Amino acid sequence: MSEKPHRIYTTSVASVYPLYVAKVERKGRTKGEVDEVIRWLTGFAQHEVNAHLDAGTDFQTFFAVAPMNPARRLITGTVCGVRVESIEEPTMQEIRYLDKLVDELAKGRPMTKVLRQA
């Protein structure tokens, strides 16, 4: 008997996106910075991100079709008490990478550090 996939996989990115934006805006950051983080992580252009948001694409599909930035492997640390680099399920790891980037943005880290740039 197979285990039921995690609920987040079938959740639309568009339903969580406003929560990401609200989280960073409470800390003085911007929607544009959330978009920049999403583009950096996924490799999508802004019009592609917008199309996925408009279409209600779920997280599993969103990350399955994204080219993904190879530098995402530099993202380390914990989200919800779990080390992102030790998550074995690939889709869950991609979701947690995004969560970690949004958390760092909300904590006021400089964008160059959030985007793992030298």
Image (cartoon, rainbow, N blue to C red):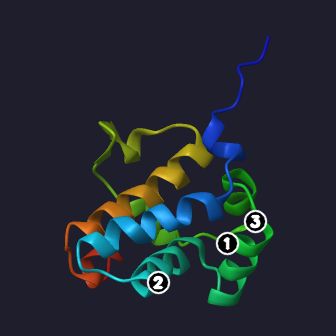
Q: Are there few (<14), some (14-19), or many (20+) residues within 10 Å of tag 3?
A: few
The spot of residue 41 in percent (x, y) is 51, 71
Q: Is residue 60 above or below residue 103?
A: above
Q: Residue 10 vs residue 69: left or right?
A: right
Q: Are there few (<14), some (14-19), or many (20+) residues within 10 Å of tag 1?
A: few
Could one spot residue 108 in this view of the protein? yes
> What residue do we see at 52% from left, 37% from top?
88
Q: Could you say whether the residue bearing mark 3 is in a helix, strand or loop?
A: helix
> What residue do we see at 68% from left, 56% from top?
12
The spot of residue 78 in percent (x, y) is 29, 45
Mark linked to residue 65: 3
Q: Could you say whether the residue bearing mark 1 is in a helix, strand or loop?
A: loop
Mark linked to residue 91: none
Outermost top residue: 1
Quarter of image, res 55: bottom right
Mark linked to residue 36: 2
For the residue marked with disc 1, what is the amino acid? Pro
Q: Mark 1 points at which residue?
A: 67
The spot of residue 18 in percent (x, y) is 51, 67
